[in-house]
Image (cartoon, rainbow, N blue to C red):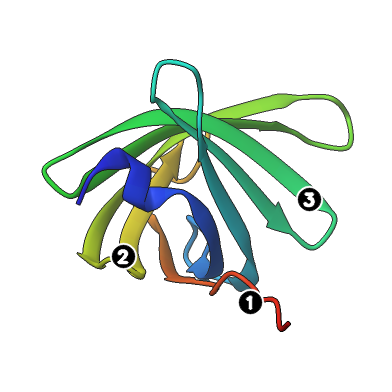
């Protein structure tokens, strides 16, 4: 796979970085910047997280950040392994998260809509 093959939208199922591993669902959008670096945007309900990263040897690494309701900034890293061109399996950790646990995410590509003539 090449970095260009990653571009698209993915359905995300994940668990948080805590003892309960509370599940969540959302969308991960991957695009490229002018330097062919990954630009990521997670949409989980009304919560948005942004990140940037790089891809090598079927491994995707994204540094991400987001703000909470009190404008406190959280930062972390997500690491994904590409199972096949449409599936990512990964884990993540936040700087201030529980160090005893990792979050997890499983992502499946959402097919681009096809237009009918």
Mark 1 lies on a secondary structure that is loop
Mark 2 lies on a secondary structure that is strand
Q: Which mark is residue 47?
A: 3
User: Vertically, is 58 above or below 90?
Assistant: above
Front residue of 85/112: it is 112
Going from N to C along the chain, the mark reached first, 3 or 1, is 3
Provide residue 37's location: percent of width, then percent of height. 40, 25
Residue picked out by circle 2? 89
Task: Judge the density around disc 2: few (<14), some (14-19), many (≥20) Cα neighbours within 10 Å.
Answer: many
| Discs 3/1, front | 1
Q: Which mark is residue 114?
A: 1
Mark 1 and mark 2 in contact (Cβ < 8 Å)? no
Q: Which mark is residue 46?
A: none
Task: Judge the density around disc 3: few (<14), some (14-19), many (≥20) Cα neighbours within 10 Å.
Answer: few
Going from N to C along the chain, the mark reached first, 3 or 2, is 3
Provide residue 113's location: percent of width, then percent of height. 65, 74
Give the distance between the C-alpha atoms of the residues marked 2 and 1, in whole angstroms. Answer: 26 Å
> Quarter of the image containing the C terminus?
bottom right
Q: Is residue 6 left or right of residue 20?
A: left
Q: Residue at x 78, y 50 (%)?
A: 47
Give the distance between the C-alpha atoms of the residues marked 3 and 2, in whole angstroms. Answer: 21 Å
Mark 3 lies on a secondary structure that is strand
Q: Residue at x 34, y 70 (%)?
A: 87
Give the distance between the C-alpha atoms of the residues marked 3 and 1, in whole angstroms. Answer: 28 Å
| Discs 2/1, front | 1
Q: Is residue 67 visible?
A: yes
């Amino acid at each position: 796979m090449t970095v260009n093959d990653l571009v698209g939208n993915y359905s995300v199922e994940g668990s948080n970085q805590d003892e309960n591993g509370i599940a969540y669902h959302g969308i991960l959008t991957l695009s490229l910047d002018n330097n062919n670096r990954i630009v990521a945007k997670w949409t989980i309900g009304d919560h948005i997280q942004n990140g940037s990263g790089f891809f090598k040897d079927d491994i995707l690494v994204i540094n991400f950040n987001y703000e909470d309701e009190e404008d406190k900034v959280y930062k972390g890293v997500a690491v994904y392994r590409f199972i096949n061109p449409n599936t990512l399996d990964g884990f993540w950790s936040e700087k201030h998260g529980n160090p005893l646990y990792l979050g997890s995410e499983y992502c499946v590509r959402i097919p681009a809509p096809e237009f009918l003539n």
